[in-house]
């Protein structure tokens, strides 16, 4: 059974409303950081995807390479992003986070999580987990429907079902990893 038109329209409205609310909360927390939201977004996608080419990063962000170049220049100047030669193509470079970049991103996540924790003080753990799962499922569906940097859609169901097992990724966050033996409760 598919989603009805009015439900889809309401969801679109709610997504945009959430986006505006997130921008407001993020802007308030920016006073503690010299990085703007665009820089933080670039760090997130580099951290999430591991070493990747600038062209793949631009495609993932939905922007052109020239729009990305200024953020990359700033992040390299801060020492947060490093370029290494692509072993598959010596003419190209791969972008990855430096240890300082991973630390900055982890600190940003920690600060934002603490802010959100305060905002959700009257929520139960179950409510927060249910909201997180819904957002994750929506993100997976949107990514599956959108353009793919390498031209290959993700495997069906990849990332759709979170597990309680996870590991810390290059971006400083915990990501599902069935091979990990650390459970959420152990963290």
Image: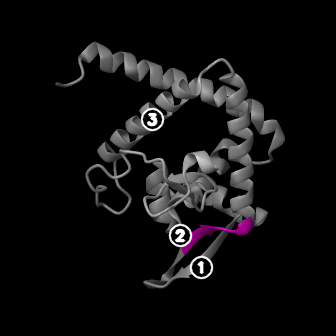
Within-10-Å neighbours for mark 1: few <14, some 14–19, many 20+: some
Q: Residues in magenta? A: 94-99
- Overall secondary structure of the magenta section: strand
Which residue is outermost to the left? 1
Which residue is outermost to the top? 6
Q: Which label was assigned to residue 84?
A: 1
Label 3 residue SS: helix
Q: Find residue 146 and report its image quarter.
A: top left
Q: Name the residue under label 2.
A: 51
Q: Which label was assigned to residue 33?
A: none
Q: Nearer the viewer, residue 99 or 117?
A: 117
Residue appearing at x 63%, y 55% in the figure: 43
Please, is residue 179 above or below residue 63 in the view?
Answer: below
Residue appearing at x 44%, y 39% in the figure: 136
Q: Nearer the viewer, residue 14 or 158?
A: 158
Which image quarter holds the N terminus? top left
Lower position in the chain sequence, tag 3 or tag 2: 2
Residue appearing at x 35%, y 55% in the figure: 148
Residue 57 falls left or right of residue 39: left
Please, is residue 24 above or below residue 87 in the view?
Answer: above
Q: Which of marks 3 and 2 is in front?
A: 3
Please, is residue 149 above or below residue 114 in the view?
Answer: below
Label 2 residue SS: loop
Residue 31 falls left or right of residue 162: right
Q: Nearer the viewer, residue 135 or 101?
A: 135
Q: Name the residue under label 3.
A: 133
Could you tell me if residue 67 is visible in this image?
Answer: no
| Contact check, label 2 and label 1, Cβ < 8 Å | yes
């Amino acid at each position: 059974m598919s989603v009805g038109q009015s439900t889809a329209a309401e969801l679109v409205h709610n997504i945009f409303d959430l986006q505006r609310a997130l921008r407001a909360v993020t802007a308030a927390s920016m006073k503690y950081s010299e990085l703007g939201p665009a820089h933080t977004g670039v760090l997130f996608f580099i951290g999430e995807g591991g070493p990747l080419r600038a062209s793949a990063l631009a495609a993932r962000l939905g922007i052109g390479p020239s729009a990305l170049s200024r953020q990359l220049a700033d992040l390299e100047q801060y020492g947060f992003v490093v370029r290494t030669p692509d072993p598959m193509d010596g003419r190209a470079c791969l972008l990855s986070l430096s240890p300082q970049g991973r630390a900055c991103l982890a600190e940003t996540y920690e600060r934002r999580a603490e802010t959100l924790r305060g905002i959700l003080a009257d929520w139960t753990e179950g409510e927060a987990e249910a909201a997180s799962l819904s957002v994750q499922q929506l993100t997976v569906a949107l990514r599956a429907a959108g353009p793919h940097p390498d031209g290959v859609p993700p495997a069906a169901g990849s990332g759709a079902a979170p597990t309680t097992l996870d590991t810390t990724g290059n971006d400083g966050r915990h990501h599902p990893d069935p091979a990990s033996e650390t459970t959420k409760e152990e963290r």
